Image (spheres, rainbow, N blue to C red):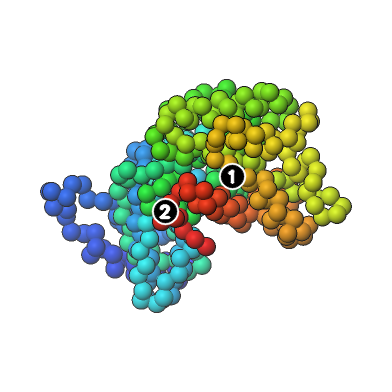
Amino acid sequence: MRRFKLALLAALTLSAGLTAAPARAHEGPRPLGIENCTAGACHFDVPPGTYDVKVLLGGEAASSTSISGEARRSLLPETPAAAGERVARSFTVNVRTPEGEPTGPDGTPGLDLAVGGSAPALAGISVTPARHARQILLVGDSTVCDQPAAPYSGWGQQLPQYLRKGLSVANYADSGESTVTYLRNPQLWATVQPLIRPGDLVLIQLAHNDKTTDEATYRANLETLVAGVREKGGEPVLVTPVVRRWFNADGTLNNNTALLVNSLGVDHPAVIRSVAAAQHVPLVDLTAETKALVESLGVEGSKAIYLYNEKKDNTHTSVHGATVYAGLVRDALVAQHLVPEGLVRVG
């Protein structure tokens, strides 16, 4: 901690010259900068909206820095810099109220960023309103949402770190929601739909909590969500649910619990695939992807993906697991040309 504080103080001194000069009148308001940062954290008093953040990383010693923000969202993966080197990175962040789950507490007004990593060094930062940024809006449940507390994490919480400047994630997934409750609660779909702009992607993953939803209702609810996205000019993307870590004796996940077949026999992934085909909607088959991954890791290796070791939880993912699953989503979006390769980070 002492080493980090010294490194940050040096970085603050280094960057002071970059931000101290007054902006010329024709340049407009000066970007918010590192004067808004203290040891390990930055706060920017901005209204809800979308913002571009440019950071300059590095110091006199070798460093490795990551950035997270708002409701525990991973915004920039750990980025190394050699001694004396400066590395510039940019990302776009969504600021909203509530800052995490839509039915959760409001959180802190403005934009809050946390500086982390194994040897963090922040040399400079600039925050400006985003111009012409595209959105990925997320509709989902607890396996997707911005989880408020460790060790939990939804894959939507980890997705922003894979995206570059010009593309933000607005995560409106909420714990415990089914297709029925998401459509019914005014804090959810009725709030999300007006935010959709032409060209925005809306990823929909709802299944884990549709335990008593019959097939006709489930199908109709998915169709309602798809139609609602298209009504606003957005592009819906249906996402099959992540599997539960529930092994058979032979090491496979071929059972109703793992593969999200509810108590009425409704095969949620199969219905989602059917609706996607019938409505000509892009599909991210996260059920198939996560099934293959969990089975390849086996009974022991897959424990780290979920919260089995911490909570004996075979449904919710760890930060590591959510990061891996977010990578699968990123890869699927790029493979289907839903997101340009230039707007994603690889690795």
Q: Position of residue 36 (x, y in %)?
A: 33, 53
* Disc 1 from disc 2: Cα separation: 18 Å
The three-letter code of the residue at mark 1 reads Val
- The reply to whether residue 24 is in sight is yes
Residue 178 vertical placement versus 13 (above, below): above
Q: Secondary structure at mark 2?
A: helix
Instruction: Determine the image quadrant of residue 267.
Output: top right
Query: Mark 1 near mark 2, Cβ–Cβ under 8 Å?
Result: no
Which tag, 1 or 2, sits closer to the chain's start? 1
* Camera-nearest residue between 15 and 260: 260
- Residue type at mark 2 is Leu
Residue at the right extreme, as displayed: 249
Picture residue at 18% right of the left edge, 47% below the top: 28
Q: Which residue is mark 2?
A: 343
Disc on res. 284:
1
Give the percent coordinates (x, y) of residue 13: 29, 67
Rendering coords of residue 220 (x, y %): 62, 24
Q: Secondary structure at mark 1?
A: strand
Residue occupying the point 45% across, 26% down:
231
Q: Quadrant of residue 130?
A: top left
Q: Nearer the viewer, residue 110 or 274?
A: 274
Tell me: 201 left or right of 213: left
Q: Tag on residue 36?
A: none
